[in-house]
Amino acid sequence: MKTLISSTAALLLFVTACSGSDTADGNTTTAEEATTTTEQMSSTTEEVSTTDPDPCETIPVAGSTFSLSGGGLDHEVQLYVPTSFDGSPLPVVLNWHGLGSDGSGQASLTAYESLAQAEGFMVVHPTGVPAAGDTRNSWELAQFDTPDRDDVEFAETLIDKLVSSYCADPTRIYSTGMSNGGF
């Protein structure tokens, strides 16, 4: 495409430079004006051709995992998209684990992936991180509150990521959790 635009620009410059004649409306087009027009065409074409793919065409079905930084910390996230996914935005259930557990354990405990497969929704099992002075994965509570951790911000970052990259329907985001994850 860039070759076509470059060739068109060169031809336009050549014709303009050689003709030097007035146009039908009596105005003369200069080589500088032709170059500016060609650069504008090239810029517009490049913007159109570098668009991001539609997330509804590229998400993995069945189980997958990814890491996500948000709220000051990095979290592992387990995601399940039903195999019946047809490219339409999906409702999402965020399933938060209890104190000391993780996303994978929460997925096994609740069997939400089977329910997601049967009912046609995406289920997401994020993993918390240990609080300062503790070794257990957790979600932020008053006793775990530190300035370098914001799990509400992480939840917002997660939802934004699900909508922008995983075809989540922003009008149908639901949340559930067990124990510490339900707080």
Image (cartoon, rainbow, N blue to C red):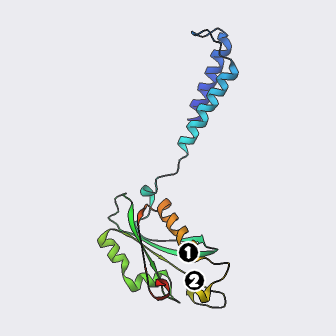
Residue that carries the numbered disc 2 in the rendered image:
140
Residue farthest to the right, as pictured: 32
Q: Any mark on residue 54, and which?
A: none
Q: Measured from the top left, where is residue 128 in percent x and y?
A: 55, 81
For disc 1, the neighbor class at 10 Å (few under 14, some 14 to 19, many from 20) is: few
Left or right of 31 on screen, residue 85: left
Label 2 SS: loop
Label 1 SS: helix
Left or right of 40 on screen, residue 118: left
Q: Residue at x 36, y 58 (%)?
A: 88
Instruction: Compute the Cα span from label 2 to label 1.
Output: 8 Å
For disc 2, the neighbor class at 10 Å (few under 14, some 14 to 19, many from 20) is: many
Q: Is residue 171 above or below residue 76?
A: above
Q: Tell me if label 2 and label 1 are in contact, CB under 8 Å.
A: yes
In-front residue for pair 2/77: 77
Residue that carries the numbered disc 1 in the rendered image:
152
Q: Residue at x 63, y 84 (%)?
A: 145
Q: Is residue 99 above or below residue 167?
A: below
- Tag 1: amino acid: Val
Q: Measured from the top left, where is residue 153 in percent x and y?
A: 58, 72
Q: Measured from the top left, where is residue 112 in percent x and y?
A: 37, 78
Q: Earlier in the sequence, mark 2 or mark 1?
A: 2
Residue 71 sits in which quadrant?
bottom right
Residue farthest to the left, as pictured: 118
- Tag 2: amino acid: Glu
Q: Residue at x 65, y 12 (%)?
A: 28
Q: Is residue 17 above or below residue 42?
A: above
Q: Quadrant of the N terminus?
A: top right
**What is the number of callouts on the image?**
2
Residue farthest to the front, as pictured: 142
